Image: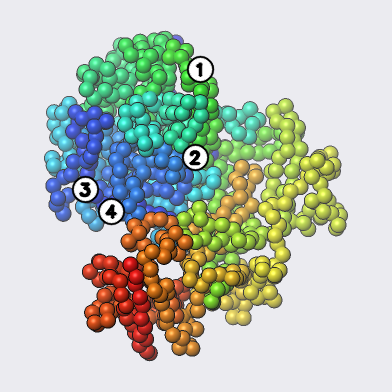
């Protein structure tokens, strides 16, 4: 085949296998840098003139899973390497930090690109481009263009039935803004921005589950809101994916990166299967080892982009990357195919790799080309119809400041028509297996040995899961009788049908833990009784597995609300066992668990022995039965006994198990202890004793399942922070009001030098400045009252309302931050406090000693 033959052929379609923390920032309207300024000098965004008629760019951060990613409402994601402040925590909003809280950054900025032929003109609209001077997508003016947040988690205050993930970020924007103060003039095409007249509705989705926490799904609806047909439309995801530790935010961090495209990888289940991965990736060239070891500044991981849905199955795909040199255009480079009579070479002007202007961008979007990986830049690819290696090929091949464009098309969009696309932003851990590999194995003219040392396994598995969450394999979503593609594997002679692709209808769902139980706390002096109802936890089928997979509950406590602070104090789980079977085949030999856990009764029935004890058969002493070999392990701890001293107990041990249909419940079968009617049968409690009454405690009860060995899902558990309740082990407000108990204050006197913070009574998570962390506590309060502090002369120091009309946690307790109504610290001295409620007024004294 000649180069002309190769060049004229189209590449086939991608093979598609089958309490949150919001960081929302409304800052200056936009961020644009001078297009002549190099990235290293990009120190801030140029604000637009303040006007209520101009759009405002907002950011929100995905941080529910292991991928922290900043999303904007202008067709971009990532923060241009800037430190954008989260107004709630004061911490920097991450561009893309992976893994979570590691301070390892894997993105400068990414953007959506779209181009089309409109009439006789070629037009392209981009979220941003290589010089960060072209920004052509904008939201509506506030409040119509604001980002929206939804969650499928019922315990989340932003719960919505329309949410698809634990953390949905929804934004809408158009390319219709032509105001010269907002959209810059195209210096290459010498004209102002000409819109395609499209509207983009973007929903990004993130999960915290172990199999889905390494990716974020982007789902776009692209609508033609103009009056002209958009012909030969191509779309693309453009990524400037720099990799660095936050301490290296500079050229040393982003001038040594690699980009490439991974087409396939061996499937983890074996059987000779190869997964089609089709993911564009970027990473650091060597992972930044320190000497011969990894340390906290090392970046050994990889992040990439995978297209999982397009408007058509018969599209051409392209992968292009290039290196931009801001000051010397002659050193600009990107792999380019040599021209042929049928497809002449297109000059980009002074630059070889970077497409500037609408027409060059459209060429890059639409030209069917797959570039070789950056590591292979110094290798001669002229036999594949590429231009010869550039002058500085050996330098570029070692890693450089590169970006890529993953694009597809063509298709047409008629006026009013809306088309979908979906892509996954995916992370994979430890692409670099050993710190010394790059030093020992890499050669610019012979990079294959080093390339083969790269471990893409985690990226490939996470890419597979991203496609499976988008379209569940083996699930007939539209009930037309087709559930997707599968193959039959026979390890050890046992036939096993494995679905690897869905039915082509989006699901946007994955396996999830059972819903967390409804929870309330009953306080007493020195004691908290945790009461929960698990009706939904124990009866809700998993949407992905299509079966009830509830396994048990865990009770957590913490002294602050950080997830790392929660620890298990007790648990309850059903008595069940995993059955391991020995598999022997040419492809695989070993023990496997392919079924959900068995109850003791079901195992005894299978074995035909009413005294059968599975724990008697271990891996060292297995069971030989019916030409197979088995051993058994408990699923979790089998801590299934209820009512033991200091254990979980049923509140209504004599209650009978009701129907799942609430319309059949009898009045005597339900309790309203959680406001809504719930069956008494599922009501549990656990008591925490010997607590310090003056220290608040965070309490949570989680629900967990037994996972799914068939598809490689480990046990999933709800997050303890999702339904955590903070409460003091003090007298509850209803008891205070019933018996007319007197309010009191502690500590009294309050001493600045007493070391309350050091002893853990204040500012446990260290998020507040010392002068803002001080607290004087009021206890035995009625549910609704007013608290006032006065000097001895009768001057009001501060006053605030205590309002818990319906009771609940902390309804008998409140605090004063020892800041006056004039935002000053009070002087040392004696003060009066007054608690005024509907039934009485109480007065007391407190002392402050600085």
| Residue 478 picture location, percent across and down | 51, 49
Q: Which residue is mark 1?
A: 441
Mark 3 nearby-residue class (10 Å; few <14, some 14–19, many ≥20) = some
Dot 2 lies on which element?
Answer: helix
Mark 2 nearby-residue class (10 Å; few <14, some 14–19, many ≥20) = many
Residue 423 is at least partly visible in this image: no
Q: Nearer the viewer, mark 4 or mark 1?
A: 1
Spatial separation of the CA atoms under disc 2 and disc 4: 29 Å
Q: Earlier in the sequence, mark 2 or mark 4?
A: 4
Indicate left or right for 361 with 422 as reference.
left
* Residue sitting at x 63%, y 38%: 498
User: Are the residues flagged by discs 2 and 4 in contact, CB closer than 8 Å?
Assistant: no
Q: Is residue 599 above or below residue 825?
A: above
Q: Which residue is mark 2?
A: 467
Q: Earlier in the sequence, mark 4 or mark 3?
A: 3
Spatial separation of the CA atoms under disc 1 and disc 2: 33 Å
Quadrant in the picture for residue 143 = bottom left
Q: Tell me, for residue 146, which label it has, or none.
A: 4
Spatial separation of the CA atoms under disc 3 and disc 2: 36 Å
* Residue sitting at x 69%, y 52%: 635
Q: Earlier in the sequence, mark 4 or mark 1?
A: 4
Q: Nearer the viewer, residue 486 or 417?
A: 486
Indicate left or right for 109 with 664 as reference.
left
* Residue sitting at x 65%, y 67%: 648
User: Are the residues flagged by discs 3 and 2 in contact, CB closer than 8 Å?
Assistant: no
Q: Which residue is mark 3?
A: 28
């Amino acid at each position: 085949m000649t180069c002309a033959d190769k060049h004229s052929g189209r590449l086939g379609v991608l093979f598609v296998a089958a309490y949150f923390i919001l960081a929302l920032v409304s800052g200056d309207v936009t961020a644009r840098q001078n297009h002549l300024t190099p990235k290293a000098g990009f120190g801030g965004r140029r604000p637009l003139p303040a006007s209520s008629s101009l759009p405002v760019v907002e950011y929100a951060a995905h941080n529910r899973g292991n991928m922290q990613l900043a999303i904007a409402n202008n067709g971009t994601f990532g923060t241009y390497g800037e430190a954008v402040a989260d107004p709630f925590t004061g911490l920097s909003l991450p561009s893309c930090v992976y893994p979570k809280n590691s301070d390892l950054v894997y993105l400068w900025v990414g953007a959506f690109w779209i181009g089309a032929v409109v009439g006789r003109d070629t037009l392209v609209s981009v979220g941003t481009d290589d010089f960060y001077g072209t920004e052509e997508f904008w939201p509506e003016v506030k409040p119509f263009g604001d980002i929206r947040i939804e969650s499928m988690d019922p315990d989340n205050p932003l719960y919505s039935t329309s949410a698809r993930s634990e953390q949905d970020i929804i934004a809408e924007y158009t390319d219709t803004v032509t105001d010269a103060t907002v959209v810059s003039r195209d210096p290459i095409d010498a004209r102002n921005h000409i819109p395609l007249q499209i509207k983009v509705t973007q929903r990004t989705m993130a999960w915290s589950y172990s199999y889905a926490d390494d990716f974020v799904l982007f789902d776009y609806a692209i609508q033609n809101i103009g009056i002209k047909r958009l012909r030969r439309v191509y779309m693309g995801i453009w990524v400037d994916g720099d990799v660095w530790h936050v301490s290296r935010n500079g050229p040393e961090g982003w001038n040594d990166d690699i980009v490439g495209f991974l087409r396939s990888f061996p499937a983890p289940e074996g059987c000779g299967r190869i997964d089609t991965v089709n993911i564009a990736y970027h990473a650091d060239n060597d992972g930044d080892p320190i000497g011969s070891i990894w340390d906290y500044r090392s970046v050994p991981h990889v992040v990439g982009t995978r297209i999982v849905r397009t408007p058509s199955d018969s599209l051409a795909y392209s992968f292009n990357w290039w290196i931009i040199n801001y000051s010397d255009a002659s050193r600009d480079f990107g792999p380019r195919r040599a021209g042929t009579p049928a497809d002449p070479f297109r000059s980009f002007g002074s630059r070889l790799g970077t497409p500037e202007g609408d027409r060059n961008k459209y060429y890059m979007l639409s030209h069917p080309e797959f570039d070789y990986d950056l590591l292979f830049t110094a290798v001669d690819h002229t036999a594949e119809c590429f231009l010869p290696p550039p002058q500085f090929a050996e330098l570029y091949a070692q890693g450089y400041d590169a970006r890529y464009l993953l694009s597809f098309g063509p298709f047409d969009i008629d006026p009013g028509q809306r088309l979908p696309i979906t892509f996954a932003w995916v992370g994979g851990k430890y692409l670099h297996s050993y710190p010394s590999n790059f030093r020992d194995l890499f050669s610019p003219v012979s990079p294959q040995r080093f390339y083969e040392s790269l471990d893409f396994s985690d990226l490939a598995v996470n890419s597979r899961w991203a496609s499976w969450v988008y379209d569940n394999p083996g699930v007939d979503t539209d009930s037309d009788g087709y559930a997707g593609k599968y193959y039959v594997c026979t390890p050890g002679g046992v036939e096993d049908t494995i679905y690897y692709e869905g039915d082509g209808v989006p699901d946007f769902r994955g396996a999830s833990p059972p819903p967390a139980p409804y929870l309330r706390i009953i306080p007493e002096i020195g004691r908290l009784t945790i009461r929960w109802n698990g009706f939904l936890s124990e009866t809700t089928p998993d949407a992905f597995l299509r079966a009830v997979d509830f396994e048990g509950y865990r009770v957590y406590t913490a002294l602050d609300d950080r997830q790392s602070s929660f620890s298990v104090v007790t648990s309850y789980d059903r008595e069940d066992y995993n059955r391991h079977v020995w598999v022997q085949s040419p492809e695989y030999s070993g023990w496997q668990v392919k079924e959900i856990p068995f109850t003791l009764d079901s195992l005894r029935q299978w074995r035909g022995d009413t005294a059968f004890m599975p724990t008697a058969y271990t891996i060292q002493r297995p069971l030989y039965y019916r030409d197979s070999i088995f051993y058994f392990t408990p699923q979790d701890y089998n801590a299934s006994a209820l009512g033991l001293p200091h254990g979980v107990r049923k509140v209504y041990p004599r209650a009978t198990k009701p129907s799942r249909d609430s319309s059949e419940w009898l009045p005597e079968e339900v309790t309203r202890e959680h406001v809504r009617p719930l069956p008494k049968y599922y009501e549990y409690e656990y008591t925490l004793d010997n607590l310090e009454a003056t220290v608040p405690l965070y309490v949570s009860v989680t629900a967990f399942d037994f996972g799914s060995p068939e598809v490689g899902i480990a046990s999933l558990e709800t997050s303890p922070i999702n339904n955590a309740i903070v409460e003091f082990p003090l007298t509850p407000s209803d008891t205070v009001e019933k018996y007319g108990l007197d309010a009191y204050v502690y500590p009294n006197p309050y001493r600045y030098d007493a070391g309350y913070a050091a002893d853990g009574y204040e500012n446990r998570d260290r998020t507040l400045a010392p002068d803002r962390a001080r607290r004087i506590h009021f206890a035995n309060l009625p549910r609704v009252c007013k608290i006032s502090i006065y000097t001895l002369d009768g001057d009001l120091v501060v006053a605030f309302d205590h309002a818990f009309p319906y009771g609940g946690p902390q309804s008998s307790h409140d605090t004063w931050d020892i800041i006056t109504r004039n935002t000053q610290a009070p002087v040392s001295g004696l003060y009066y406090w007054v608690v005024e409620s509907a039934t009485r007024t109480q007065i007391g004294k407190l002392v402050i000693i600085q």
